[in-house]
Image: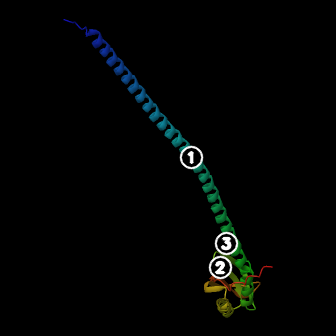
Amino acid sequence: MIRINLLPVRAIKKKETAKQQVVILVFSVCALLAIGIAVFTVLQTKIVMAKNEIANSEKELQQLKAKIGEIENIKKLQDEVKKKLDVLNQLRKDKAGPANRLAKLSEALPDKVWLTRYNENGSNVSLAGIAYTEDLIAEFMRNLQATEYFANVELLVSQQTEINGVKAKQFELSCLIKSGPQPQPQPQK
């Protein structure tokens, strides 16, 4: 009978199988490692790109904030200029007002009536003066009411007084300033 020793073949097959399993294990670990490194690299690249995008967005945001600040400053300057122009327009409109009111007051003043006090407080005017008779005071009040600058003329006090031996009437009036005729703007050259 012939004897065949199969043990070394089995041992060789076991060694080859073990080698194949080790090779497969090493290959699998290397493949997993390569996949892990690739995923890590891709994610790291995405993170860097996101950080760069955030940095660019923050720079752009700072630039936009600076522009907004400039725009707000321009709006404030516009408001200031508008207020100044409004004041100038009001001054232009009112520059002839007091002179015209006083001229009309002088025209409304009858002979033998003298003013001793004229006071403007906003749109309220108080007047004091001396006249020879009450009729002259009434005429003065009618003339004042008829002007385009004064309204609501009221007699507050009328009392008899003596000045240098002459009997006269001392009076006080109050009235309101109406907005008179608006001066026509001069054409600019």
Mark pair 2, 1: CA separation:
63 Å
Residue 165 locus on image (x, y percent): 75, 86
Can you tell which of label 2 and label 3 is closer to the viewer?
Answer: 3
Dot 3: element? helix
Mark pair 2, 3: CA separation:
25 Å
Q: Amino acid at mark 1?
A: Glu
Q: Vertical placement of 79 versus 150: above or below?
A: above
Q: Residue furthest left?
A: 1
Q: Which quarter of the figure is the C terminus placed in? A: bottom right
The residue indicated by pointer 1 is: 58
Dot 1: element? helix
Q: Residues within 10 Å of mark 3 (few under 14, many from 20)?
A: few
Asked whether disc 2 touches disc 1, contact meaning CB atoms under 8 Å apart, the reply is no
Q: Is residue 47 toward the left or the right of residue 4 in the image?
A: right
The residue indicated by pointer 2 is: 125
Q: Vertical placement of 156 versus 54: above or below?
A: below
Q: Which quarter of the figure is the N terminus placed in? A: top left
Can you tell which of label 1 and label 3 is closer to the viewer?
Answer: 1
| Residue 39 appears in the figure | yes
Dot 2: element? strand
